[in-house]
Amino acid sequence: MKAIICDEFGPLETLRYDDLPDPVAGAGEIVLKVEAAGVNYPDGLLVQGLYQSKPERPFVPGNEAAGTVLSVGEGVTHLHPGDRVLGALSLGGFAEQAICAADRCFPIPADMDAADACAMLVAYGTSHHALKQRAQLKSGESLVIFGAAGATGIAAIQIGKTMGATVIAVCSTEDKRRIAQENGADHAIGYDNLKEEVKALTNGKGADVVYDSVGGEAFKAASRFMARNGRLLVIGFASGEIPQLPVNLTLVKEYAVVGVFWGNWTRHEPAEYMKNMEELFAWYKDGTVKPLIEGRYKLSEATEVLTKIMNRGAVGKLALVP
């Protein structure tokens, strides 16, 4: 089978598109014929050795893939060859076939787009957990979303609106702001004059919840426009800068800074994770949420796709299609 191989941590350009032996399912596993593999910002960090986890090399990146079950290993009784599933993988998604633990597979409808299914896992899963469990977002609250035209940002807009929030999307270009509003944002603004614009849009109160996947100067602005009892969610640092928090502001303004590590949460609270995914798929089924798929690319184009994401050039979700 063809796969994207990371031989050693390094620049994205060192990734290799090459042949590997077809995988064989072990006990409790399935082999998935990959129809689409989702590409995420952490994938780019991982292959460069910049992520929290550092797998043994060589490895195949990619932690979400959707497709058809080819074979099942010993002890797997709830899945069968021919079933369509979404798989939450440790690694291995950027390939024509992938191994997945059977208990981390979610059945998907026969007519569900595979790229849509991938988006539901990390992008929608992260945003859902962030807003539901970590922020405990309430109807009527204001929600400010940085990087709002990316995959997790679009998910946060749609989920925030579903939960009853007034959504203020923050994007770097006019085109991205337009896309954010097309996906449900009540307001869309740029990164200049953030404090003043957020204060104006919230009638001077400030933001109840901020979804920050950007860090850097955006985080610094957010630390100054939070409302009393607000929750500033730390999702990631797409700007490349991990900011410093003026802790005195959390004291005088009485807001909380809350870390969001979706992958860690799924391992520690698997029952709640399953409930979240059930809710997301129900929302997808009734049309409440709908991923924006910017593009489907050849597996061999993984380096170019990762580069686009790392340079914050992506709008919505990008997927590799073997």
Image: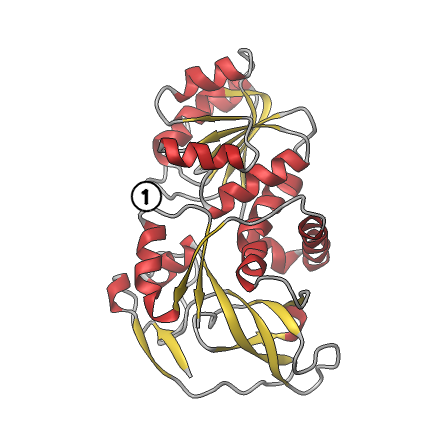
> Mark 1 sits on what residue?
240
Q: Residue at x 56, y 64 (%)?
A: 114
Q: Is residue 114 visible?
A: yes
Q: Residue at x 55, y 49 (%)?
A: 291
Residue 208, given in percent of the width and then of the height, sits at 59, 25
- Looking at the picture, tell me which residue is in the foreground, 71 or 288: 288
Q: Residue at x 57, y 44 (%)?
A: 127
Above/below status of 132 relative to 187: below
154 sits left or right of 14 in the view: right
Say few, some or many: other residues with alpha carbon within 10 Å of mark 1 (under 14 / 14 to 19 / 20 or more).
few
Q: Quadrant of the N terminus?
A: bottom left
Residue 70, given in percent of the width and then of the height, sits at 59, 83
Q: Residue at x 50, y 41 (%)?
A: 153
Q: How many marks?
A: 1
Residue 133 location, quadrant = top right
- Looking at the picture, tell me which residue is in the foreground, 239 or 248: 239
Residue 304, given in percent of the width and then of the height, sits at 30, 60
Q: Is residue 263 visible?
A: no
